[in-house]
């Protein structure tokens, strides 16, 4: 996912996609024990996407807190 795609998502959509990505990672790791993965960089890319979404969520929360203190 690109940064602009993540920025367009709402908080609930981001949380939902984070959960989906984590489930995908678990499935890939489980399948990896029995057969070699077709795309070896898929787990790495999913982890990076999760990190980007978590960072965007944190930035939104900090922006809301900053507005409250003003």
Image (cartoon, rainbow, N blue to C red):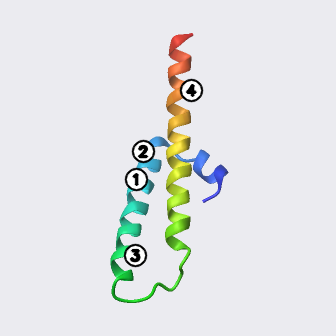
| Pair 3/4: label in front | 3
Pick the front one: 55 or 11: 55
| Pair 1/4: label in front | 4
Say which residue appears at 54% left-offset and 47% top-offset: 9
Q: Which mark is residue 28?
A: 3
Residue labelled with disc 1: 16
Residue labelled with disc 4: 63
Q: Position of residue 11 (x, y in %)?
A: 46, 42
Q: Position of residue 38 (x, y in %)?
A: 51, 86
Q: Which mark is residue 46?
A: none
Q: Position of residue 54 (x, y in %)?
A: 49, 45
Mark 2 vs mark 1, CA separation in Å:
6 Å
Q: Mark 2 touching mark 1, by CB under 8 A?
A: yes
Mark 2 vs mark 4, CA separation in Å:
17 Å
Dot 1 crowding, Cα within 10 Å, few <14, some 14–19, many 20+: few
Q: Residue furthest top?
A: 70
Residue labelled with disc 2: 12
> Which badge, 3 or 4, is on the more N-terminal residue?
3
Q: Mark 1 touching mark 3, by CB under 8 A?
A: no
Q: Residue furthest bottom?
A: 35
């Amino acid at each position: 996912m690109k940064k602009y795609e993540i920025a367009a998502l709402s908080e609930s959509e981001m949380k939902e996609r984070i959960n989906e990505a984590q489930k995908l990672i678990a499935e890939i790791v489980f399948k990896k024990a029995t057969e070699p993965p077709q795309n070896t960089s898929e787990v790495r890319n999913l982890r990076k996407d999760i990190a980007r979404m978590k960072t965007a969520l944190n930035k939104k929360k900090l922006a809301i807190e900053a507005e409250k203190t003003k």
